Amino acid sequence: MLTVTEAIHWLGLDFPANAGNRLYWPFLISALVIGLAYQHWHKLPSFLTKAIWWHPSARQDYALFMLVNIFKLSVLSVILPEIGQFIWWGLMRWQDWLGYQSKQPASIEINIAFTICLFVANDFSRYWLHRWMHTSRWLWPIHRLHHTAQVLTPITFYRIHPLESLLFGLRYGLVTGLITSIYMHWFGFGLHAYQWLGSLVFVGLANMVGSNLRHSQLPLTYWTWLQYWLISPAQHQWHHTVAGNKHNFGSILALWDRLFGSLHNTTYSSKFRFGIEPEPKPENLIRQLLLLAPKDH
Amino acid sequence: MLKAIVRLPLLALFLTGTSLADAPTTLETKIKPALLQHLYDQVLVADSQAAINSLQKLQQQLASQNISHPDWSLLQDSYRDLALHWKAVEAMYIAGYLNGDYLDHPRYIDYYHQGNESIYDQVSKALASDITLNKALFKHSNKGINALEVMLFPNQPISAHLAARHIQGAQLASQTMAIWLGEIAVFYDTDQSFMTGGKASLSLLVNRLIDSSYKLAYWRVGEAAGLTPKTKGVLHPQSLEFQHAKLSKAAVTRILETHQKIVRNPAAQDLMTVGKAFGVEEDIAFLQARLNATMVALQAVPEPFADQLTSDTYKTLFNELAMLQNAYYFMLINSLNLEARILDADGD
């Protein structure tokens, strides 16, 4: 018999209590405070209205969030190897290819370099996988579901097809496994990735300064120069617009968009119309999950 | 004013966030100085003292021998004692990491698996020659523990003249070894940096355990039986350590016993204790189980190793040692503070 606690866990309703995800309560509160201050500063319309948070698209997000969470816990957790297995696999490969290496103690500098490498490699691979999800005729139908959102809330971050969850899980496992195992090949015990609030320190920092506003109706913009380095919430919102979904694939760093020609700078007064159709219509969630949506890309 | 509205909550959030950050209940705070002191005294200091003591005993016996008709059996027993104490020191050798001046000491004492030269051929040739021993044994490698093995374990009955050359060569080699081994023992006896090193000190030991487990599996066992990528399918008995002294199995045993002293010891000042405090007790218990299984596999292989290279028990021992290395890797991986929940790494 399912207990209330178990039900909460299966539906993902305990996310705000768990460090290591974007909905962890300190990140939600920081996003709220920053959002309210920014909204007041620029005299923007409220991003907390019922029209947004109870929009049919937002309700789809909530349903999908719970559904996908059940899928993750029941299916993906079984078929996806654990991160430790990816690292072990990497260690064996490095030992085969490079020979055994006596392990040196990891200094603070090495641990800082390791933390930076993990962050940069993960951000880079997220950029490319995200970009491929837009450009590949096979991957776009999977990612399309994320872009049919007509309003954005922090839960929209989790509005993704289970197959996308699988792909991003594999990406994380492979990249983290390869980077960690190569460092471990040389440095062994004592290796340490610096974390903050349950996330890699840079990710934790990004979350604390408003990652949850990326999926929101508040077009928070950074200084123009900074938007060449970091993707602002408004830049990601631009990516969700009908006109902008070939731009701003980056997650935290704007560097990749700059390097590979997909960066688009935005201002808070830009026109944002979210979705994939010029005249968006609510789409059936089941059809989207079954990848039966019209070919529109 | 508006800027202050933005900045103040941000500042407050940062401060709150800082206090909420992963509490400093890291490995650092859970490694008690008493634990490090115990490992240092009972393993590093004790083994290095035992090694230098056994070397001094051997030197005394060498000095008191009738060099033309030595008591080989007595000297060989002392050599065995020395060699096995040295294996314990070598397995956990961290002096070079604590002080760079001591980095190469093991290389001057032990030439096993270093370079391609045959210590046996070189030393045998030098002893059989008419050149003075100081000149004939000029190379470092001719005055280490492997050379000493050649000198004290002659293959067949030898002439009085050659016996004297062997004993004099052994005196020379043991004098050289006494310098290096003595420096190691004095360093461990006087240096205190390990006890104050916390996590870094523990890292040194764990890295040595991993290193040692690899060398046990691939150098000391696998290579001779053609079970490694290097010797794939081809028997290579000359890869065995101490094959003339027939100490190959005893060396492996002593190294594994040294692992056990670190992983689990009767005083409970060990990795298991650290694992309990850090919540990875299961990993250490698994490691201990693998160590025990490896010991069982080792006991099942009759001596000498050289006669067992194609046996199933020998292959089982190699597999167990390889799994032991994996167990160390699993412990290593789980000691990382990485986000294990792959499924939270969603898209954008």
Image (spheres, coloured by chain):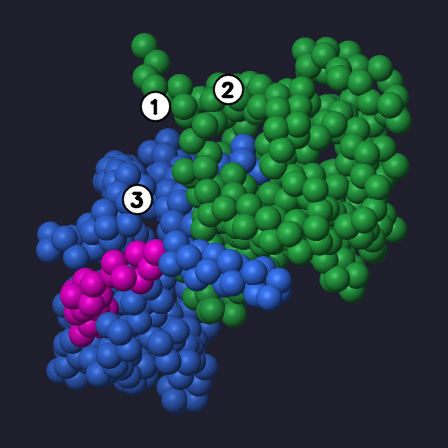
Chain colours: A green, B blue
Q: Is residue A241 left or right of residue A285?
A: right
Q: Nearer the viewer, residue A233 or A139?
A: A233
Q: CA distance from mark 1 to mark 3?
A: 25 Å
Coordinates of residue B285 in the picture (x, y in percent): 25, 40
The chain holding disc 2 is A
Closest to the observer: B130 or B40? B40
Label 3, label 2: how far apart the Cα atoms are: 28 Å
Task: Tell if the residue under mark 1 belongs to the same chain as the one under mark 3.
Answer: no
Q: Residue at x 74, y 38 (%)?
A: A130
A180 or A197: nearer the eye?
Answer: A197
Q: Position of residue A205 (x, y in %)?
A: 55, 56
**Would you identify the image quadrant in which residue B7 lies?**
bottom right
Which residue is the site of mark 1? A5
Q: Residue B32: say if magenta.
A: yes
Residue range in magenta is B23-49
1 or 2: tag closer to the N-terminus: 1
The amino acid marked with disc number 1 is Thr
Q: Which residue position is annotated with label 3?
A: B280
| Residue B173 picture location, percent across and down | 32, 80
Count the marks: how many?
3
Quarter of the image with the N terminus of chain A is top left
**Residue at point 38%, 49% (across, down):** B335
Instruction: Inspect the image, locate mark 2, and give the three-letter code of the amino acid beneath it.
Output: Ile
Q: Position of residue B83 (x, y in %)?
A: 26, 65
Q: Residue at horizontal 61%, vertical 28%?
A: A50
Indicate the chain on which mark 1 is placed.
Answer: A
